[in-house]
Image (tube, helix red, strand yellow):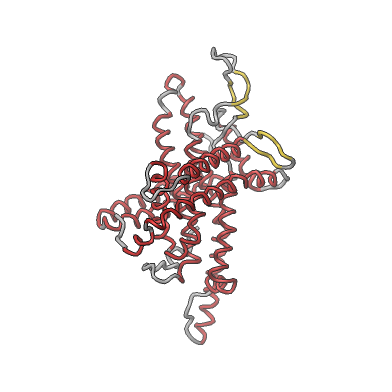
Amino acid sequence: MRRFRPDAKAQVSLRAVSSEVKNVFKAILAAALLALLPAVLSAAEALPGSAAKAVEHGAKDAHAAAAHHGLPAAAPVFNLGPLQFTSSTVITWIVALGLIIFAQMATRNIQMVPSGLQNFAEWLVEGMYDFFTEILGKELVKKTFWFFCTLFIFILFTNWIGLIPGVGSIGWGEPDKSSSLPFAVGHLSQPILRGGNADLNMTLAMSLTFFFLWTVWSLQALGPGGIAKHLFSGGDNGKGFMAIFMMGIFFFVGIIEVISIAFRPVSLSFRLYGNIFAGENILESMMVLIPWLGWLLPLPFYFLELLVGLVQALVFALLTSVFTALMCAHHDEGHGEDHGHGEHKHAH
Amino acid sequence: MTGSLHIGLAALGSAIGVGIIGMKAAEATGRNPGAAGAIRNQAIIFAALAEGVVFFAIFLAK
């Protein structure tokens, strides 16, 4: 049950709604931008000594050694100069393209009384707007809503499209001689399509994009001095010797806070990648665990993965917005709640 | 028997943590149904934080 707040209702009046729907288009363009980023990042990772690549490949090698039927690595589809486009990149384009087409169709003919696609788009955007207003406050949500809503919608549909049978399981590999079916492959090495968020490049790209925007928003809200004060000062220090002592304490607390902030992109990207990659692996393992029951065993896990896809999209959008609110929102007047930042001090 | 005991222990710990968060969130919603939205948000955030431990254990192992 949502708390009733008349002013929040007034904000989403009929007149404001059409501009909200137009904003979907802007949000979808940002999704396309996000989809392009992993290509750039994976090009950077082609250089030796990249930690992320080593970690990802270490995890995959370990898994390949443990079980032969895991999710295959992202296969390069084509190269454009130094940029490498993989099967995981392609699926993010498909999602972005689908979202762009949806946004265009929903906003082509905007009516005062919405119906059909426009109604659905308005329901989605309004719901997300109310949801993020509760976290970010009324001022900050106007500035940052496009990013968080895009993240949520984009991650959600990237997760769900990866569950469609055939994604990650159709491709090139060694022919399976024992199977009577034509074109059967024993060990799939190059899938045509592969779950987008089952690639660490994608999740890392999104969390680094967030980290960049978070820095910009923090600088806009507080300025460099304000950020330092926010991190290293605990407010009233008292007098005399205690003041010096407390300054020292708050300085070390600030250092811990800086470390925790520096780990946020890592934990954000690993959380999403780990969940989706593990989910795809569970589905593949369940199909081959008991050969004659392979048609039934993955079924409960498919429902689990539908839920995980939604929850992880929500978690990513929620955590990024909370991180933003922790740094930027405590100057906002009128959003009623005290976002006591001590409570979340060590959250990362 | 081979394997990584520490990953199992991390998974056990975070599973207990997520379970406790879910239990308390359900209790809190029962006590104050009006605050269901806020409780759900907090529960998801803290469940995600508790769950993140496993990924550190998996990827930073060895």
Query: Which of A157/A306 is in front?
Result: A157
Query: Which of A210/A154 is in front?
Result: A154
Observer able to see residue A329: yes
Q: Is residue B7 above or below residue A178?
A: below
Residue A26 location (% of width, % of height): 53, 51
Q: Residue at x 56, y 55 (%)?
A: A210
Q: Quadrant of residue A80?
A: top right
Q: Is residue A305 above or below residue B9?
A: above
Query: Which of B2/A246 is in front?
Result: A246
Residue A298 location (% of width, % of height): 43, 29
Q: Decide if residue A117 is on the left or right side of residue A281.
A: left
Toward the right, the furthest residue is A81
Task: State which quarter of the image contains the N terminus of chain A.
Answer: bottom left
Q: Decide if residue A150 is on the left or right side of residue A12.
A: right
Toward the top, the furthest residue is A180
Query: Which of A188/A80 is in front?
Result: A80
Q: Decide if residue A300 is on the left or right side of residue B5.
A: left
* Count of labels in the image: 0
Q: Is residue A175 above or below residue A79?
A: above
Q: Is residue A197 above or below residue A250?
A: above
Observer able to see residue B6: no
Q: Quadrant of residue A173?
A: top right
Q: Quadrant of residue A187?
A: top right
Residue A147 location (% of width, % of height): 52, 54
